[in-house]
Image: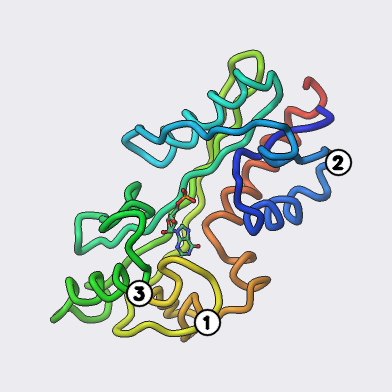
Amino acid sequence: MKKLIFATGNEGKMKEVRMILADLDVEVLSLKEAGIEAEAEENGATFEENAKIKAAEIMKRSGEIVLADDSGLEVDALNKEPGIYSARYMGYDTSYHIKNQNLIRRLEGKTGKERSARFVCAIAAAFPDGRVLTTRGTMEGEIGYEERGENGFGYDPIFYLPEYGCYSGELPLEVKNSLSHRGKALRLMKEELRKLKEEL
Ligand code: IMP
């Protein structure tokens, strides 16, 4: 295994991915670096399915080993919404301030554990011989009562981490990466790839 493609157009994600996979001794290319344009449609029913669809599609087009992720926020009191629809929740173009205020409003009257939530990330690896592996990482927390912090993106300003006594949006990037669902899923995938390294 000499190189792999991580199927994202997001530079921030690429930076995190390269940092975590650095000791795998593999060249990690973004879609752009691999010269691949379109992304696959995410029409699966789970994070894993979406990640697999994306990875398999790009693997077919490139012939290389491809990693892809799918992530989102699950709020237990809302039947795990927005879940796989996290990016699409209330419309792609709606600001996260509006999405976040809406979630806070929907949890009115609920306290403590009734506000439990988690970030989930599934990573899939699709291999040219047809094999597909998936890993999952989560970060547990609660939906806060207000938006806090200037760091992060998306739902980070309302994601409270009881163990750390702060919001995800208040964590420095390196700290968030060390705790995050994406970091955890990616480190698990790195171990899977390490096991396969000899045969690829
Ligand atoms: P994806 O990158 O297409 O999988 O979309 C994931 C969506 O879930 C993002 O657009 C955010 O709305 C949300 N999300 C995933 N991870 C995080 C995170 O670490 N912080 C805040 N929001 C996140």
Which amino acid type is shown beneath numbered disc 3? His
Residue 177 is drawn in which quadrant?
bottom right
Residue shown at 25% from the left, 61% from the top? 76
In this view, the residue farthest toward the left is: 109
Asked if disc 1 is less than 8 Å from ligand 1, the answer is no
> Which tag, 2 or 1, sits closer to the chain's start?
2
Is 47 rendered above or below residue 132? below
Mark 3: few, some, or many residues within 10 Å (few <14, many ≥20)? few
Q: Which SS class for mark 2?
A: loop
Q: Which SS class for mark 3?
A: helix
Which numbered marker is on residue 150?
1
Q: Gap between marks 2 and 1, in whole Å?
A: 34 Å
Residue 118 placed where, x, y %?
Answer: 39, 62
Mark 1: few, some, or many residues within 10 Å (few <14, many ≥20)? few
Residue 109 is drawn in which quadrant?
bottom left
Residue shown at 47% from the left, 79% from the top? 163
Q: Do the residues labelled 3 and 2 touch (CB within 8 Å)?
A: no
Quadrant housing the N terminus: top right
Which amino acid type is shown beneath numbered disc 1? Glu
Residue 115 placed where, x, y %?
Answer: 26, 73
Comparing 160 with 162, the one in front is 160
Q: Gap between marks 3 and 1, in whole Å?
A: 12 Å
Q: Pointer 3: what residue?
A: 97
In this rendering, would 142 be left or right of 65? left
Comparing 163 with 143, the one in front is 143
Which amino acid type is shown beneath numbered disc 2? Asp
Residue 127 placed where, x, y %?
Answer: 65, 22
Residue 107 placed where, x, y %?
Answer: 19, 74
